[in-house]
Image (cartoon, grey):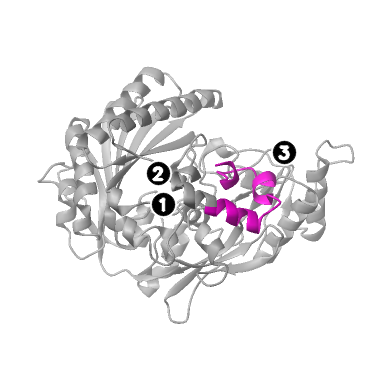
């Protein structure tokens, strides 16, 4: 058993008898795949998270290499009534949502990284431990891509199980819209393939239902020809606030005119670097045009003027652009991170201006002085055609109504350095989030939807999907996990049962 049990901290007197027995049982069978706190491998995995707020100290770490081994872990934790967490790439920043402390074990999917293409090249199978960089890189020689995250460093599992926003969403919907099959581990340890015709209720739930239903080990997704694309990053001075707000609003309202365009726009307050604001945009166009009309507000000559005076759009590939946004090297921010989100109906430019101005005024008033603080507002235009496209392949539980659109999803991002300030960010995120929601509601500008992948722990994600969809999800969860293994023993994440 060598390295796997070296330094095993558990004895018969351990207060965590369930978890100690579970870890030791797995170590007996999977000698080279179970790691305890004295192991260097344990420490490497424990700290391999995007945000320092996710770093905890589980009792042991299990690194399964197949669906069969994940199944064995679920059976083991269930048998010993032992808590556990699961991580794919470690991008979730909320403490305890993709990790666990010493009362439980961590299943790290970092070995489940197979990527393969079907004989007819129409589908790609993706192991749950992959990031999108690996997927895009695999598909590029075939001149194909799939509907994944904007940044290549984002993990596949969490992204898809939360729905998944992409640059191609206006044309192809959420990432989960393109999932054809989920290879799943159920709460009893059985391995099933969920599709539109086999376990169709489970398949539907996994389109944005998070981790309440099953553990997914492989995603099989549709592929699409890449063709020529133009993409780039626009940067703008803090004096262009009004033009930035107008450009986001206009993109939401008029972006449906050409669904090949995609924009992620960010406003940032970073007092250590710049007491004023800075503005950026990630721009994408899925066609052979360096000056598409749908992106004209961002590229110069219309509303916003890039700081270098040049059109940011350059000919590239999905793989190269998604990698360029983070440098192609795995990133640990070295700081602590949190998101929250509010959905705005794009019926008035003033709605986005209210969110923008109120957020940064409150942040300056209440967060100035926190070590390493920076606050961002990421604005994601969501058009009606995006919502309609997401109804393909069986739809999803999110309950979005194109007739209520277009929308702007306003994501608040918080970065800070010290753990002692977690409570400050927790309080600010919740109180400001509730306060701005009330203001938007009073003006008729608020949409109820809460996007899982950018939500904070205090937000009731699944209730925002609508009463009928929530009840359907609760029934499906009970059908597949009546003992609440993925709720009670795996506490991390938003849970359908708690909505």
- Spatial separation of the CA atoms under disc 1 and disc 2: 8 Å
Q: Secondary structure at mark 3?
A: loop
- Closer to us: 383 or 227: 383
Q: Secondary structure at mark 2?
A: loop
**Left or right: residue 375 compared with residue 49:** left
> Crowdedness of circle 2 by 10 Å Cα count: few (<14), some, many (20+)?
many
Quadrant where the image shows the N terminus: bottom right
Q: Looking at the image, which residue is at 34% across and 52% down?
A: 401
Report if residue 442 lies within the magenta region: no
Quadrant where the image shows the C terminus: top right
Q: Which mark is residue 378?
A: none
Q: Using the rendered image of the protein, determine whether residue 291 is visible from the camera's viewpoint.
A: no
Q: Secondary structure at mark 1?
A: loop
Report if residue 476 lies within the magenta region: yes
- Spatial separation of the CA atoms under disc 1 and disc 3: 38 Å
- Closer to us: 41 or 218: 218
- Spatial separation of the CA atoms under disc 2 and disc 3: 35 Å
- Closer to the observer: label 2 or label 3? 2
- Closer to us: 64 or 474: 474
Q: Which mark is residue 102?
A: 3
């Amino acid at each position: 058993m060598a390295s796997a049990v070296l330094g095993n901290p558990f004895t018969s007197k351990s207060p965590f008898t369930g978890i100690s027995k579970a870890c030791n049982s797995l170590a007996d069978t999977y000698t080279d795949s179970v790691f305890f706190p004295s192991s260097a491998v344990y420490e490497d995995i424990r700290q391999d998270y995007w945000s320092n707020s996710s770093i905890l100290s589980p009792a042991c770490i299990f690194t399964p290499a197949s669906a069969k081994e994940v199944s064995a872990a679920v059976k083991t934790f269930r048998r010993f009534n032992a808590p556990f967490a699961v991580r794919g790439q470690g991008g979730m920043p909320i403490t305890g949502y993709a990790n666990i402390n010493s009362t439980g074990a961590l299943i790290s999917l970092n070995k489940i990284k197979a990527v393969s293409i079907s004989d007819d090249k129409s589908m790609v199978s993706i192991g749950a431990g992959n990031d999108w960089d690996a997927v895009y890189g695999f598909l590029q020689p075939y001149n194909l891509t799939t509907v994944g995250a904007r940044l290549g460093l984002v993990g596949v599992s969490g992204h898809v199980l939360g729905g998944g926003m992409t640059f191609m969403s206006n044309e192809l919907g959420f990432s989960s819209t393109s999932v054809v099959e989920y290879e799943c581990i159920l709460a009893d340890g059985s391995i099933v393939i969920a599709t539109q015709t086999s376990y169709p209720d489970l398949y539907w739930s996994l389109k944005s239902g998070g981790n309440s239903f099953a553990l997914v080990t492989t995603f099989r997704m549709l592929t699409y020809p890449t063709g020529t694309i133009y993409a780039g990053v626009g940067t703008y001075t803090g004096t262009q606030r009004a033009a930035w707000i107008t450009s986001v609003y206009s993109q939401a309202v008029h972006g449906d005119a050409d669904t090949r365009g995609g924009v992620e726009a960010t406003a940032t307050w970073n007092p250590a670097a710049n007491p004023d604001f800075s503005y950026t945009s990630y721009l994408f166009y899925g066609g052979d045009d360096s000056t598409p009309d749908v992106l004209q507000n961002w590229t110069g000559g219309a509303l916003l003027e890039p700081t270098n005076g040049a059109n940011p759009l350059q000919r590239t590939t999905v793989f190269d652009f998604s990698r360029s946004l983070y440098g192609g090297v795995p990133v640990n921010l070295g700081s602590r991170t949190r998101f929250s989100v509010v959905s705005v109906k794009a019926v008035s430019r003033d709605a986005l201006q209210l969110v923008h101005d109120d957020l940064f005024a409150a942040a300056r008033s209440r967060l100035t002085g926190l070590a390493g603080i920076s606050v961002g507002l990421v604005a994601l235009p969501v058009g009606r055609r995006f919502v309609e496209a997401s109804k393909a392949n069986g739809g999803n539980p999110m309950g979005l109504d194109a007739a209520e659109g277009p929308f702007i999803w306003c994501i608040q991002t918080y970065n800070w350095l010290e753990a002692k300030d977690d409570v400050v960010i927790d309080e600010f995120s919740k109180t400001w989030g509730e306060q701005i929601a009330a203001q938007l509601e009073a003006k008729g500008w608020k949409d109820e939807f809460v996007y899982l992948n950018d939500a904070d722990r205090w937000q009731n994600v699944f209730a925002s999907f609508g009463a009928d969809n929530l009840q359907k999800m609760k029934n499906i969860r009970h059908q597949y996990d009546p003992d609440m293994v993925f709720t009670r023993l795996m506490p991390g994440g938003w849970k359908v049962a708690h909505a």
